[in-house]
């Protein structure tokens, strides 16, 4: 099975940077996903990492260290619309996703 | 490209009643998933279909939950009878076979309240 941990809540100011950490324990590794979920809406795909290192996509970047069982999602130049829950998810060998509980990010003016 | 469609969006029922949810995945997506998301938690997989066959239903409470995908496209999830603890958002997702790194595409969900 998969065991995924991420902080429950984070608060940051508009324009700032926030880093959301995720640690995982899996029986096999098939990459790691990050999803964004606004309140009352469906999760939407943000990133997928399978190799170690940092992948940048505009204001959002995702980092993976397979040896440490660790990933983070970095949100830069925060905007009010970034207030959402961010879900870390790890797929099994047949790509069923196990999700963390999610980190609720609140962006304040 | 149309996304994953779900209906109804909201449903309120009393305990012991029955309820059914419908999902239409993205065209061409062979794999379909139903998740249960309780408030404050991440989605939990209930059942996974590949075309019209069940791949994994190990976390589906089979005494009260059932799901089908008869023609390999649309799917329905049923709860009979509902309990208070079934109050949650039920998310349907689909993915393209052979492209697992694209992740799963989620529908808007059905918010179920059991009174």
Image: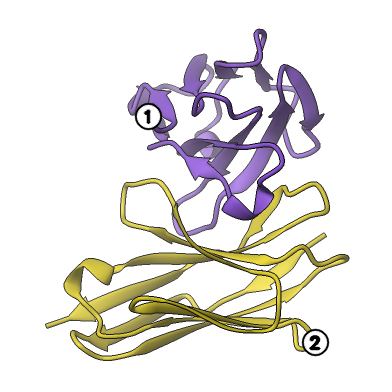
Chain colours: A yellow, B purple
* Residue A104 location, quadrant: bottom left
Q: How many marks?
A: 2
Image coords of residue B44 (percent x, y): 62, 48
Q: Which residue is mark 1?
A: B2
The relative height of residue A1 versus residue B78 in the rendered view (above or below) is: below
Q: Secondary structure at mark 2?
A: loop
**Residue plotted at (18% across, 84% down):** A14
Q: Chain of mark 1?
A: B
* Residue A15 location, quadrant: bottom left
The relative height of residue B103 versus residue A66 in the rendered view (above or below) is: above
Badge 1 local density, few (<14 within 10 Å), some, or many (20+)?
few
Marks 1 and 2 on same chain? no
Image coords of residue A39 (percent x, y): 31, 54
**Residue plotted at (51% across, 26% down):** B25
**Residue plotted at (79% across, 34% down):** B56
Say whether residue A87 is left or right of residue A105.
right
Disc number for residue A67: 2
């Amino acid at each position: 099975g998969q065991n995924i941990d991420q902080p429950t809540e984070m608060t940051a100011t508009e324009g700032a940077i926030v880093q959301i950490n995720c640690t995982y324990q899996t029986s096999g590794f098939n990459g790691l996903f990050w999803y964004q979920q606004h309140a009352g809406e469906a999760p939407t795909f943000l990133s997928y990492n399978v190799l170690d290192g940092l992948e940048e996509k505009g204001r959002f970047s995702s980092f993976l260290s397979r040896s440490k069982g660790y990933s983070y999602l970095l949100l830069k130049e925060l905007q009010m619309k970034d207030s959402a829950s961010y879900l870390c998810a790890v797929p099994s060998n047949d790509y069923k996703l196990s999700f963390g509980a999610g980190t609720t990010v609140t962006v304040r003016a | 490209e149309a996304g994953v469609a779900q209906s109804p969006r909201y449903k309120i029922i009393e305990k012991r009643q029955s309820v059914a949810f419908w999902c239409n995945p993205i065209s061409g997506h062979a794999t379909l998933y139903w998740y249960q998301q309780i408030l404050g938690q991440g989605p939990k997989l209930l059942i996974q279909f590949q075309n019209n066959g069940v791949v994994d239903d190990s976390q589906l409470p089979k005494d009260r939950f059932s799901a089908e995908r008869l023609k390999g496209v649309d799917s329905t999830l049923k709860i009979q009878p509902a309990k208070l603890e079934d109050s949650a958002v039920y998310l349907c997702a689909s993915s393209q076979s052979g492209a697992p790194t694209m992740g799963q595409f989620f529908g808007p969900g059905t918010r179920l309240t059991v009174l």
